[in-house]
Each structure stands twice: as C-alpha cells, then as structure tokens.
Amino acid sequence: MRFSKSLIPTLKETPAEAEVVSHRLLLRAGFIRKLTAGIYTYLPLGLAAIRKVEQIVREEMTRAGAQELLMPMVQPADLWHETGRYKKYGPELLRFVDRHDRESCLGPTHEEVITDLARREIRSYRDLPMNLYQIQTKFRDEIRPRFGLMRGREFIMKDAYSFDVDDSTAEESYQCMYDAYKRIFTRCGLEYRPVEADSGTIGGSFSHEFMVLADTGEDTLVICSGCDYAANSEKAVVAAPGRDESPMLPLEKMETPGKRKVSAVCEFMGISPKELVKTMVYKAGEEAVAVLVRGDREVQEVKLKNFLGVVDVEMLDDKDVFAATGVPTGYLGPVGIKVKLLVDNEVAAMCNFVVGANEKNHHLKNVNMGRDFEPFGVADLRQITVDDPCPVCGGVLTMKEGIEVGHVFKLGTGYSKAMNAVFQDSDGQDKPMVMGCYGIGVSRIVAAAIEQNHDENGMIFPMPLAPMQVIVLNLGLKNEQITGAAEALYRDLEEKGIDVLLDDRDERPGSKFKDADLLGIPLRLTVGKRLTQDGVIELRSRRDGKVEELAPQQVVARVRELIEAAMING
Amino acid sequence: MRFSKSLIPTLKETPAEAEVVSHRLLLRAGFIRKLTAGIYTYLPLGLAAIRKVEQIVREEMTRAGAQELLMPMVQPADLWHETGRYKKYGPELLRFVDRHDRESCLGPTHEEVITDLARREIRSYRDLPMNLYQIQTKFRDEIRPRFGLMRGREFIMKDAYSFDVDDSTAEESYQCMYDAYKRIFTRCGLEYRPVEADSGTIGGSFSHEFMVLADTGEDTLVICSGCDYAANSEKAVVAAPGRDESPMLPLEKMETPGKRKVSAVCEFMGISPKELVKTMVYKAGEEAVAVLVRGDREVQEVKLKNFLGVVDVEMLDDKDVFAATGVPTGYLGPVGIKVKLLVDNEVAAMCNFVVGANEKNHHLKNVNMGRDFEPFGVADLRQITVDDPCPVCGGVLTMKEGIEVGHVFKLGTGYSKAMNAVFQDSDGQDKPMVMGCYGIGVSRIVAAAIEQNHDENGMIFPMPLAPMQVIVLNLGLKNEQITGAAEALYRDLEEKGIDVLLDDRDERPGSKFKDADLLGIPLRLTVGKRLTQDGVIELRSRRDGKVEELAPQQVVARVRELIEAAMING
C-alpha cells in the first residue's frame, strides 16, 4: 500500500489516555482509535496485524481437525437461564430487551449457544469427537476497561468447543488443542508459557493459560526452576507445612493501645509477623466471611472464591467489618468471632500465635486452633510467594509477569447436563457429551506482541504478525532515478506477494525514518542519495538495526530470503 | 473436507418455518441454523459460502482503491444524537444502556462512526479522496424478520464510505464504487440489475440499488425495453399526464346505499374505475393525511413518505379513519374533508370524476379539483404500472422481482455538516467533506444466489460462490480399489487448492447422490463400480446434468479446466 493514500495517522505526541506501551504505540502508530470506553476502531494497519493472527489461528485449528463456523453476537437470555449463568455472570454480561421485549444479551462467550447447537445436531457417538470454532467479536462490559486492546469491552476472540463421548477422549481433545496452541503462539513469534490456571466463570475441572511474558502483564506466573511446574499465581498450590507440635501455652490477653497494623503490633510485642495471624473479612455473596492468614501473607481471593463456590468476593471496608463483627479493624481475631471462619493451611499448622482479641486495643497471645476456636474450614487460601517450595518437586520458584492470550478448559459435563446435550452411545444409552472450550484473544495478541517487542522508537513486530513486512522509503520524490527505483521495488515486492508499504509522502527523511521505526515494520529499504551516488539501496532490520547495502537487482531476493527465515513453522 | 467428520446436518424434511426457497434449502443443506428470530449460526458450509463472497468483495474494493478497517458493533448514542438519527431511526436501532448507564446502540450502519473518525483524522484536501470500508456484523431489530438470510436481524454487511473535497470528485467516487459493484456481482456469477432507488433512512440525494433478479424478490423493478432506464418501483417516476380540458359539469350527490368498494360503486353507477377517485388515509408522524388516487391505482407509500419528509407512513384502519374524518370508510372524499389532502398528478389532470361524499351511503359525481376542493399538495404519489410509459423515453416498461444485494448512495454533506467533519481546502478554507456510502449484503448474497440458482433437488451454486467446488462420492467404502481411488482424488484435488468435499460416510449411494444435489456443489465425481468394471470415474455438472466419463488420471486436469472456465473475471 501507498502511505500517501492510506489512513495511517501517526502521532508525534503520546496520547494522555494510554497507560501501557502497547496502547501508546497502537495509538501513536495509527493502528487503532478509541470510539468510546474500551471500544476501538481498527484502522487499516491494526486490522492487517489482526488478520495475520487470524490466519495463523485458522491454519492451526484446521490442522487440529476443528471446523470453523460463526455464531451470533446477540443471544437469547433463555439459554443463559438454562445454565444458571444469566444470574451468575454479573454485570459483564450486557443484557437488554429487543423491540418485542425479549430478554437478550451480547455474547461474552458462547458455551450456551454451542451446547444448544450440539444438542440439536449431534445424535450419535459416531458424530463424535467434534471440535467447532469461530473467530468473532465478543463483548464484555468490563467495569474498568483499560490498556487499549489488552482489556477492552469489545474484542476479537477465537473460541473453540470440543465434544466427546467420555473423559478419556475429552482428554485427547484437550491435549490436541493444547498442542495446537503451542504451535499458534510459536508461529506468532512470541515468547510465551503455558501455565496451570483457574477456571473462572467458565467453570470446568481443569485449565491452562497461555501467557506471553512481559513486564506489563496483569497476571503473575509462578515457574519452578527445578521441574516443569508453571502456574498462574491465582491457582498455584502452596504445599501445606507440617504441624508445629510445640506444647500449647496458656492463652493471654494483652493491652495493645492503638496498635492496629501488623507492623505496629509486632514492634510493640517484639515478635515477628510470622508469629502473628491476621483476620481478613470478605463479602462472599450475601455473607461475611473471615479468613486467617499469617501476618506476612496475603489472601488469594481466587482461591477463596473457589473454596466458597461464589462468583466474587470483596474485602470489606472498616465500616462494614464493624457492622458484621462488632469489632473495630485491627483488633479482629478468631476467638469468639461472629462470622464464618476460614483458616489457611499454614495457620492451621501454627502453635501459640498472636491474634486480635475482638476488643478495641487488645490482642490475644498463645492462641491455638482447636483449643481456642474451631474453624468452619481449613484450606490453601493464600497467595504463593517466591519463598514457597514448588508444590511438585519442592524446588525453587521464580515469578514472572504475563499477559493471558489463550486459555484451554476441560469443562466436563457441566454444560451438557444443564442443557441436556446428550448423544446415543454405542451401548444404546443416552449420555451427556463431555466438553472442552478453548479461547484465544486475537486482538489482545497484537497488544501482547507489542508489549514484548518494542523499544524507545516504537514497535518491533515479529515477522509473522507484521501488518507490513517491508517499508520502502522514497527519499527523492522529485528525483526520477530514486522515484523510479522505489516504485519498481514496490511493484516487484507486491508481485511476489510480500506485504509492502511505500512511503511516498511528501515528508522530510527524518519523519519517514521515525514513522518506519514507530510502525515496527521488520525490514526497511531506503532509496535515496546512496542510490544515485553509489548505486546502493540500504536494507535495515528493525529489530537489530543491522544494515546491508544492496544493488537494486539484489533487493527482492534478499528480502524474500529474510522473510522466509523469519517465518516460523510451529 | 471429509463429510464424515464435518458438521453438515442435511435434512430430508422441509422445515416448517421456512417460507422461501433459499431459507428452506439453507436449512435442509445444513448451512445455517436458527438461534432465535432473525438470528442464525452459520455452519461450516454456510460460512464457507460467505467467505467466498467476502473474498470477491475485498479484492474488488482494494482494486477500487478503498481501504479496509473494522469499526465496533457497539456505538455510543452521542454520535447518533449529533445527526438526529437517534430519534429518527425508529425501533430497528437496538438501544440499551451499559453498566455505567451510558446510552448505546448496536450498529445497524456506520455513518456516524466513520464521520466521527473522518473529522478527527482527515485534516487537509491532500488527504482526500478517501474511501474506507469494512466487512462486519450488523444488527437491525426488524419487526418481522423472515426468509432466513434474506431479512435477518443480525447479518454480515460490507459498508464503505467515501470522502471528497467537492461534488464533482464525489461523483467520481460514486461512479468508481458503482463500477466496482458491477464487477463484484458479475464475479459472483449472479444475474443482476442496477436500478435507481430511494435513499431511505440513510438520507442523501441519489442512489442506485443492485438487484439480483429472482421471482421471490421483495422488491419490484421497472425496466424500460426501449432505453437504459431501470428503477425500483418505489422510486420510478410516473410521467404526469396532460390535463383533461373537458367542460366541468355540475356537481351531483348520488345515493349509493352499501356501495363502499371501488368495484361496487362502479358497477352501481355504470362507470369505469378510471372515472372514480379513491381517498386513502394514512398516519404520517402524528398527523392523518388523505391521498387521492384513481380508482384503479395504488398509493406508493415511499413516495408519500418522501413528499411529507417523514420516516414512516401507515394506512389507517376503518376505526382510525372514522376517528380522524368522521366518515365511514367507503364514503370518503375530498370535498369538505377534515384532514390534510394530497392529490396524485394523475387525479389533478382529471375532470368530472366520482368520489365519496363524506356521508354514509352517498357519493359525489362531476367533481373537479379547484372548483370543488383545494389540495394541500399535488405530486407523483402512485405506484407505477406496466401501462405507464417509460419516464425517460416513453417506451414500454416491464416489471421484474428483485432482491436488493447492494446499494450505493450519494450522501452529500448531510452527515459532515451535522457532525462538523471539515477539511482545509487548497484555498485555506474549512469545508464539509462530501460523502458517499456503499453497502453490500454479504450474507444476503448467498441467499439471493440460491433464490436465483436452484431446482427441485436443491441448490445450484455458481462456481465463484460455491463453498465446495467438487464433491467426491466414495461408493465403495469397503472396496480397496474404490476407496483408494477416491482418497487419492481427494488428496490430489486438495493439493491443487481446489475446495473439495469427500463423501466418505457410511450411507447408501442414493443418500449420497441426494445430498450432493442438495448441497449444490457444481461438480460431482462418482467413484464406484464403474471404476472397478470399466476403469471410469463419472464427472457430473450439477447445473446442466452433463456427465463425462474419465480415466482416473484425467480427472484432476479436467476439473481444474472446468473450474477455471466457470470463474468470472468481472
């Protein structure tokens, strides 16, 4: 395409609204424009990058035996009532009534629709396994959409759904998608990591996320340096410690005037936070729940949600804590507490610890579970840390930030049972189909690629995702030889099926160099004075800055060679 | 693809819900399934047909210099308030509030969004002309969605928008799209006709529709056999006749007991319907309006809407006519009528005609406009007929049914002025951009192609739109030679980039032949007993039933030859 005829509105200034680098660069490079909160128009280059991702996804889904279809964005609420998710999904599910007052919603995901299709069209075990996917625009009414394409409200997703006769073939379908995902992210040219993950509102028994490693990622990954273990820290299991069998000392009440924070209490009492247990109060559904964790630990809310089987938990503020417990924050403790009490594994193994006395300005010393209080439940409820051992091999853990770009779920029969999606098995019996579901954030991959590949001058696209593979700079619009060579090069590259942008704008060379860097196009060809003086065209790699000087007739072959070398076969 | 592994749920029965042939066949052939009223899932073959249309559209839009982008489906109401369409559009615009109570809507079209983009990104005359398009899912909350993909609520559309510095270049942009559309529909293999059209709710000064000719079309086209004139009958101008200059006779009141219908009054009075004038009453906005047309004519409601400048008109029922006029239906007339009165050109030229007397059981004779009543307005308000002369050359008209698959509009500056989308012209002045907009019903094209191309056995796809170009029937699953040959053929055809479906199902030959016909795949290869007996594979053309017997090694070359011959270059 010709820069002069294209809508590539590059910006010199960094837009104030953008918080992360991909968002800033996507705006500055003219790839996207915001329409309203969390909703973007993909301009020509932004769309071209998305199409590159889609093509890779499509090829690998086909190779994995999945069939492409396309489901609607507007869905009837009836189906969501059948699975109970109409109530459960929360306000991210955008609901409305149509002109005939029928309850409807904008699809944030398509388990209900695909299960409805499966129960109507799949009759027999002979039709299974089946894997159906689509690449489609989704809508989730995020409360705080942010980071551009990283967490928008409207976004492009590939979602696939597998149907199997039993757990064992469902496992094979899962593994097949897991392998396809590895090929997809490898072919995209991304540094990524599959990790064990929480299943969230999709439900199901087991899942993996595919994480692009980048400092700006919203997720924290736990990776073992000794074995293959890798997990989202939301999910990472903390090994339960052995019980401290020291003799129990007599319970003591201490005056701790004005000492509300862990640090203040520890300093005042001359103890370490490891000897103190804090009591955190959450709202879970309509109920208040207290959780005990060691003074230096944090509650992992996803673990808490899963333990309680609720969609969301929220930490109570001081006022609501007082309303629920009758105790001012800072002096809460398990002994005699009025709300449901959960205890982290680590605390359950402790002996003679300090807690709040449920009385202003007082704490209790030498507290012991069993003797002094009885919990409602004991579980792994805290956030893992780098000090914890790997739950598989006991090795040393490291933590990295990641961006979730893919997620595979073993759903089991939750949806098929709720919606009566059965097939007739070879034994003549009706059985629920065993399902899996598999998502890829297509538009998010473009953002993640930029988060992982950029420098101070702009994006650095991996070749497989680059909307344009080559940019040709014409630095002598009025010079016949230069313009002739640039135009010939543009034509020849296009003819070879290479995605090429010709910068034929009436702009200073400095602007052209700056924009070429900003756009992140992997290869840059400069046609300027060096051609008229030395017969040379300059080929520069965006990633490493390496420059080659080529005779005009060498250029196309060399560019093709470099592109082929940079494409990855998975 | 392999039939046995694909979701192609063909039906033997015709689904009761389907009224038109394309709807019936799309369901029977397993191309689509209904999710809810007017909303369909595109199954693999249905989606493949849509992708064929998209590819042709994309290639021709690129060739015409248009750039592809992708705009959101969810749009903020603010923009629609700016153009006044939030009020004007009616209930087809699906409106809702998001979780933050922001008024939003599902995009039925994107004039507002693209004009907003243009005003922010286009600064100078040097940026123009520009033509931006997208292929995207639209939603229009049709009151009576029907006919499957012909008139759904959710559908896939290509919409393009052009921006120009003045009327003359806008005219060139319009012509460029007009030509691109001709290439697109020609390449699709459709018999179509561009016709002059009404601009509807999009607004603007001038437009053409591209109509696929088919008996089941919802639109009626008027085509001149003497010149190039062709128009949607909604729009077709009726030439005003010369005035009848006979002397006016004295007005007479006649008793016409119980004679309410045109035919009854004419019979009773011994006159022709051409001597009688009927009075039709409509609701236009909040107002009742009466329209006079000759007894044998029909009011053209689109002409009426345009004359009145309202979004919609609706004929009143007897009760509401009485409420508005105080006269029972059947005896209405212009003399002394209490509502706004419009007169069709033809009636304005008549002399001494018969009308209702605005009194039960009475009519008036020898009525004359000007002497007996004064109209609010006189205009071309009736439906054209085959008896009317061509408004351009006076030649003989014919009428055909058509399906609208494309529409091009000259919008002018309506949107750019309302939204202040200005550019700086070469004279330094800010001027509103001159716009055009151009739609293609991508999913509707698939339905229209079927309406135009089918027989009693199923669809007959034009090669360019066929989701699969060839079907290979393996009629000897247990015979090694037959299965080997069928599999080899399948592999060889796929390798050549041909879209091929292998019917490897364990079904009787009769079922396979039936399904091959139903799916409308242009070429069928039968691998069966004739191979083992005579070394022959049968190649049959779906459209004309012509059969060729080929040796296995001839098949691929012959198939390629036939496909190439059937593709159209536009």
Image (spheres, coloured by chain):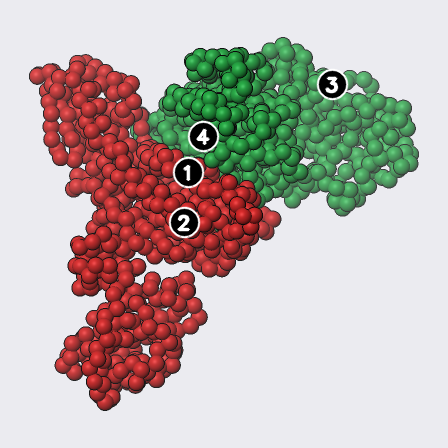
Chain colours: A red, B green
State how far apart marks 4 and 2 are (Cα). 26 Å
Instruction: Estimate the x, y position of residue A306 in percent, counting from the top left.
Output: 37, 63
The numbered dot on residue A168 is 2
Q: Which residue is drawn at 50% across and 48% down?
A: A115
State how far apart marks 1 and 3 are (Cα). 71 Å
Q: Is mark 4 on a helix, strand or loop?
A: loop
Chain letter of the residue carrying label 1: A
Which residue is labeled 3 in the image?
B243
Which residue is labeled 4 in the image?
B1
Q: Which residue is drawn at 19% across and 61% down?
A: A394
- As rendered, which of A480 and B403 lies closer to the eye? B403
Chain letter of the residue carrying label 2: A
- As rendered, which of A61 and A431 lies closer to the eye? A431
Q: Earlier in the sequence, mark 3 or mark 4?
A: 4
State how far apart marks 1 and 2 are (Cα). 18 Å
For the residue carrying disc 4, how many other residues have a C-alpha within 10 Å: few (<14), some (14-19), or many (20+)? Answer: some
Q: Do labels 1 and 2 share a chain?
A: yes
Q: Residue A509 occupies which quadrant of the picture?
A: top left
Say which amino acid is labelled 2. Answer: Ser
- As rendered, which of B517 and B138 lies closer to the eye? B517
Q: Do labels 2 and 3 share a chain?
A: no
Q: Quadrant of the N terminus of chain A?
A: top left
Say which amino acid is labelled 4. Answer: Met
State how far apart marks 2 and 3 are (Cα). 86 Å
Q: What element carries label 3?
A: loop
Q: Residue A343 occupies which quadrant of the picture?
A: bottom left
Say which amino acid is labelled 1. Answer: Ala
The numbered dot on residue A66 is 1
State how far apart marks 3 and 4 are (Cα). 69 Å
Tag nearer the camera, 1 or 2: 2
